[in-house]
Amino acid sequence: MPQLTTPLSDLSDMTITVVPEGVDSSVPLVGYLVLAPAGTRLNELITVPTAAVPTERAASGRGITIDEEERTARVDGALLELTYLEFELLAHLVRHPHRVYSREQLVTTIWGYGPVGDQRTVDVHVARVRRKLGAAYRERIVTVRRVGYKYVPATV
């Protein structure tokens, strides 16, 4: 453990970053104070989101590919033209395959506000995303009757 020998009054304009061996130093740690029990490893506390969420045979350029860093979605290598909310909805479902989300959960997660009376807006957005995915992939977003929606990747 490094020893701090400078008086605290001299640290007002100083930033100290300690990155343990084995932790990706590109992870931004500025502005965070993390309190953890003694003995907790830093890499247990930090999860680095992946830039791309590959799915559906993405390595071959086929299937649905989401790149969250570039905010793009592709189907068989072709770029999809998605609105902000359509992208968020598709990326969220693809990020959590097989998990069923109620309309209320999707409104809270994607739209960022609590449930409102009419959940039809989710149905409309799902229909638009399905239409843009095309005939080969629209069935990847499955309706769970009386519950909500889930994403089911193709079986290989």
Image: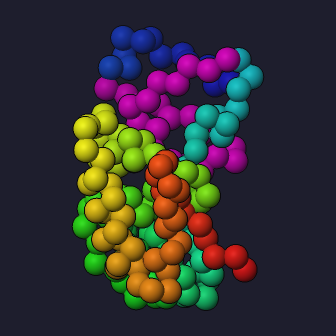
Tell me where residue 72 sits by quadrant.
Answer: bottom left
Q: Quadrant of the N terminus?
A: top right
126 or 55, nearer to the observer: 126
Q: Is residue 34 magenta?
A: yes
Residue at image x 30%, y 34%? 114
The boundaries of the magenta stretch are 13-37
* Vertical side of 26 occupied by 134: above or below: below
- Taking depth in this image into account, of 70 and 30 the one nearest to the observer is 70
Q: State the residue at coordinates (66%, 40%).
A: 43
Query: In this image, 9 relative to 138: left or right?
Result: left
Up/down of 134 relative to 31, above or below: below
Quick check: can you spot residue 26?
A: no
Q: From the top left corner, tell me how far across and down residue 50 is, in percent.
A: 54, 59
Left or right: residue 149 compared with residue 153? left
Q: Quadrant of residue 67?
A: bottom left
Question: How is the rendered protein coloured?
Answer: rainbow
Magenta segment's dominant SS is loop
The quadrant of the picture occupied by the C terminus is bottom right
- Percent x, y for residue 86? 32, 64
Q: Is 122 left, or right, of 91 in this rendering?
A: left
Residue lying at 38% horizontally and 20% vertically, measured from the top left = 11
